[in-house]
Image (tube, rainbow, N blue to C red):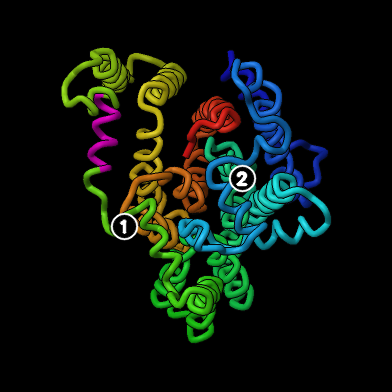
């Protein structure tokens, strides 16, 4: 019933109407998708979440501020005081600067930060829609935008995090580069690299594509200039602390060493297969997790084995249900693994159907995350690599019925993430 209902909702948004003016679609559709998904998040966090807990909870605008938001609040109100907490140097300055600007009009941090991130996320949806529409047409643009705004991790485009800002400026930089608008490439790239450390992936991606496509000196200059946001932050760290890489050293609080973290990836794999409790104790203390995992995987294998004996609709609904059960069982370790390794497979699958800069930036972004020396929040950081949304949008545009199922699953998980964040639980 839920899949059928959600299919009707998205059919209304995705279907072209005879009396609709296509020229206005670049604004209407991303705004409609953004507003619908943000309303769901706000309703869940402000109205439903309080009904699901008996303890003391956060109310009002404060519900959008938790975890990393506290670091941005300190920076916006007190600046980078490394004596107070060295870890705050790992958080880049663009969000605190823009939030501080709104706070000068008398808005509290929670209101200002929420407005900045939400408006930036809306801008990201509009820019992405326009770019994909120019490249692939209206159908792919609509599915790509739907993936971006309904992905469960799009929650971080509403709460006080940098996802909205980084998606806006990185997408704008990629679009400008794709259109050979090098001044805007440098400008938007500089803002993206001032928003978060993962913006570093833009620089090698732009340089590599410039070399492959032989674009000339202007493209090289724009590619290097896109890192000026990072350069200015390094300059600030040098002047303030005498260490231009202080922000990188601060990352050790979360990622002690650089390189591929084999141990934690193995741990996540075991948490998916045998469960966190069994991993912790080193033996099968909880039989239910591995048993349920075996049943889910076995059911998927049987469904694929006898796929010719069932209808395509039954098979798709079956895999969607199994996917939901597997997520309920494995949780965050599963989403981390799927976002990273599933994302790489997806990019490779559609590599000939999307622009070269989209593919290269996607692999550079994921490669940077794999070599970052940790596994914390990799699903959220991978979500900010817009290439993954483009790749999935291209795929779903070819299989709309599967697209409805994917967006339906996204909606369910997004609502659960909103509840967890509102209750102060770790999400990503």
Is residue 154 found left or right of 97 in the rendered image?
left
Q: Residue pushed farthest bottom?
A: 217
Q: Quadrant of residue 407?
A: top right
**Residue in the image at 48% along x and 81% along y:** 220
- Give the quadrant of the N terminus: top right
Q: Nearer the viewer, residue 341 or 131?
A: 341
First in residue order: circle 2 vs circle 1: 2
* Mark 2 residue crowding within 10 angstroms, few (<14) / some (14–19) / many (20+): many
Q: Nearer the viewer, residue 45 or 237?
A: 237
Q: Residue pushed farthest front?
A: 83
Stretch in magenta? 264-274
How far across and how far down the image is residue 101, in percent? 75, 61
Residue holding disc 1: 371
Q: Secondary structure at mark 1?
A: loop
* Residue 187 visible in the shown view: yes
Is residue 422 found left or right of 318 in the rendered image?
right
263 within the magenta span? no
Q: Is residue 86 above or below residue 164?
A: below
How far across and how far down the image is residue 234, in percent? 49, 74
How far across and how far down the image is residue 207, in percent? 43, 75
């Amino acid at each position: 019933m839920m899949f059928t209902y959600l299919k009707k909702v998205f059919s209304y948004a995705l279907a072209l109407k005879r009396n609709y003016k296509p020229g206005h679609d670049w604004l209407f559709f991303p705004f409609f998708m953004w507003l619908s998904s943000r309303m769901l998040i706000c309703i869940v966090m402000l109205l439903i979440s309080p009904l699901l807990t008996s303890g003391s909870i956060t109310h009002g605008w404060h519900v959008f501020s938790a975890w990393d938001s506290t670091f941005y609040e300190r920076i916006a109100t007190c600046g980078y005081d490394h004596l107070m907490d060295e870890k705050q140097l790992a958080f880049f300055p663009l969000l605190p600067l823009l939030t501080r600007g709104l706070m000068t009009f008398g808005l509290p941090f929670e209101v200002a930060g929420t407005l900045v991130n939400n408006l930036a996320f809306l801008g990201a949806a509009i820019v992405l829609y326009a770019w994909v529409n120019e490249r692939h047409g209206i159908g792919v643009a609509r599915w790509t935008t739907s993936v971006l705004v309904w992905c469960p991790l799009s929650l971080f485009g509403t709460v006080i995090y940098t996802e909205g800002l980084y998606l806006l400026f990185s997408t704008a930089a990629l679009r400008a580069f794709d259109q050979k608008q090098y001044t805007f490439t440098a400008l938007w790239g500089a803002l993206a690299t001032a928003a978060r450390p993962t913006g570093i992936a833009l620089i090698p991606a732009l340089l590599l594509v410039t070399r492959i496509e032989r674009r000339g000196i202007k493209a090289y200059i724009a590619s290097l200039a896109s890192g000026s946001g990072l350069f200015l932050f390094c300059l600030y760290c040098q002047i303030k602390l005498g260490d231009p890489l202080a922000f990188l050293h601060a990352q050790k609080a979360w990622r002690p060493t650089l390189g591929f973290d084999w141990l934690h990836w193995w741990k996540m794999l075991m948490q998916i297969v045998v469960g966190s409790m069994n991993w912790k104790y080193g033996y099968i203390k909880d039989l239910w997790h591995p048993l349920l995992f075996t049943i889910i995987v076995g059911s998927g294998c049987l469904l694929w084995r006898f796929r010719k004996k069932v209808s395509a609709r039954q098979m798709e609904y079956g895999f969607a249900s199994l996917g939901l059960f597997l997520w309920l069982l494995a949780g965050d370790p599963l989403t981390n693994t799927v976002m990273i390794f599933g994302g790489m497979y997806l990019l490779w699958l559609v590599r000939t159907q999307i622009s070269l800069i989209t593919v290269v930036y996607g692999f550079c972004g994921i490669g940077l995350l794999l070599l970052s020396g940790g596994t914390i929040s990799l699903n959220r950081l991978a979500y900010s690599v817009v290439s993954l949304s483009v790749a999935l949008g291209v795929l779903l545009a070819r299989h709309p019925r599967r697209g409805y199922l994917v967006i339906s699953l996204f909606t369910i998980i997004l609502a659960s993430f909103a509840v967890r964040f509102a209750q102060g639980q770790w999400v990503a």
